[in-house]
Image (tube, rainbow, N blue to C red):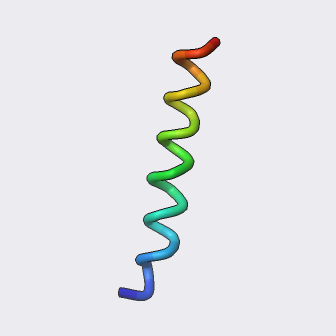
């Protein structure tokens, strides 16, 4: 489970990217 934080950051980053794309 050492990759937990990393995976969460990646998922959150993807979510932020999708939100920015929708707003753009």
x 43%, y 79%: residue: 3
The answer to whether residue 3 is left or right of residue 17 is left
Name the spot of residue 11 as percent of width and height, x first. Answer: 45, 53
x 56%, y 48%: residue: 13
Name the spot of residue 22 as percent of width and height, x first. Answer: 52, 16
Furthest residue to the top?
24
Name the spot of residue 8 as percent of width and height, x first. Answer: 46, 64
Furthest residue to the left?
1
Residue 13, compared with residue 9, is above or below; it is above
From the viewer's side, name the closer residue of 19 and 2: 19
Residue 15, compared with residue 1, is above or below; it is above
Marks counted in the figure total 0
Q: Quadrant of residue 4?
A: bottom left
Residue 1, compared with residue 9, is above or below; it is below
The quadrant of the rendering that contains the C terminus is: top right
The quadrant of the rendering that contains the N terminus is: bottom left
Q: Quadrant of residue 17?
A: top right
């Amino acid at each position: 489970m050492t990759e937990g934080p990393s995976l969460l950051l990646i998922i959150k980053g993807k979510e932020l990217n999708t939100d920015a794309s929708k707003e753009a």
